[in-house]
Image (cartoon, rainbow, N blue to C red):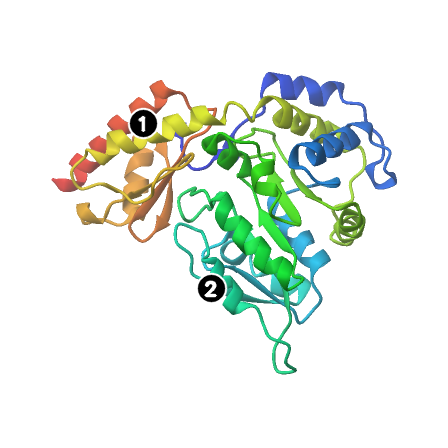
Amino acid sequence: MIDLRSDTITRPTEEMRKAAYEAEVGDDVYGEDPTVRRLEEKAAEMLGKEAALFVTSGTQGNQIAVLTHCRPGNEILLEADSHIFYYESGAVAALAGVQTRTIKGENGAMNPDDVLAAIRAEDQHFPETGLICIENTHNRAGGAIVPVSNMRDIYQHAQSHHIPVHVDGARLFNAAAAANCSIQEFTQYCDTVQICLSKGLGAPVGSILAGSEEFIKRARKWRKRLGGGLRQVGIIAAPGLVALTKMTERLSEDHENARFLAEALGEVDGLIITNSVDTNIVVLEVCGLGCSADKFVAALKEKGVLAVTFGPTQVRLTTHYDVSRAELEKAVEAIIEVREEIKK
């Protein structure tokens, strides 16, 4: 199978497997796992923050950020199709007791003026705005990059109202690679950031939450409350350290492969590429074939290609290091075959 469902399905490299086998370990709840400590120190350095915390998933990292920043009854501002709002099972309400106020963005980027207008005035009738969240890259916008200038303007509005900014940067290294800049160009405009080790970077599990030393101290307690305090966790932190130090530079290959897919499929009658393909995600509109995304994905599976639905008539294809250009060429052929069969 050629698996284009997500970059989450990547398998650890041989170097990661060896690092896991040889990892020095200790009890991380006691702060005694040397591999975890090296990972957290390296992540904080790369992200330009004082400290970092290893967490089990991007969702856990985002939720710990909300729990640490906010009080029950607060309101958080975030883009209408953001992962925290769309894909995290209502956790901000269930766990943190906060409500969401969504702002419709353009290609995943909220208008800074809209964010400013949404910040609550001091009034007993209103919840306090406790946090502003930015997703970069933006999944449902097709892996779109939120520009540094947009993040800067939102951050400045937030600072003027003493509101923290959290970045769901699950694929922020993709943004940096595509923009050909340091990731700190983005992280300088937020108080906290979460990055995934287990997507394009290829580690088998884990994410990083980074911020100030004081914030991470409080976040560590929330991780414990959520059952995320682990023991000899260096075995899974070691592949994450390889991911951070060896896998960020190669993300541009995934972006080139995504552009290849988009260019090849964009020439096929009845198929439309609906996103700008900034990074490693291609969104394919199949309504011109008169079929649903479910039907298209099912037919594609019969041809040996896995994809996911992204709406009633949209299909998402995600490139990653486990799929070669030759396999992508075969995937294009399979998609064209499905298109021909549906059109008959």
Q: Quadrant of residue 230?
A: top right
What residue is shown at x 61% (from left), y 42% (from top)? Answer: 187
- Mark 1 surroundings: few (<14), some (14-19) or many (≥20) residues within 10 A: some
Residue 211 lies left or right of residue 92; in this view the side is: right
Residue 220 lies left or right of residue 207; in this view the side is: right
Image disc number at residue 114: 2
Residue denoted by label 1: 260
- Mark 2 surroundings: few (<14), some (14-19) or many (≥20) residues within 10 A: few
Residue 63 percent coordinates (x, y): 65, 54
Q: Amino acid at mark 2?
A: Asp
245 w.r.t. 149: above or below? above
Looking at the rendered structure, the secondary structure element under dot 1 is helix
In the foreground, 79 or 338:
79
Residue 317 percent coordinates (x, y): 37, 37
Image disc number at residue 81: none
What residue is shown at x 71% (from left), y 66% (from top)? Answer: 71
What residue is shown at x 71% (from left), y 33% (from top)? Answer: 45
Residue 79 lies left or right of residue 123; in this view the side is: left
In the foreground, 184 or 330:
184
Q: Quadrant of residue 128?
A: bottom right
In the foreground, 240 or 134:
134
Residue 137, visible in the rendered structure: yes
Looking at the rendered structure, the secondary structure element under dot 2 is helix
193 w.r.t. 300: above or below? below
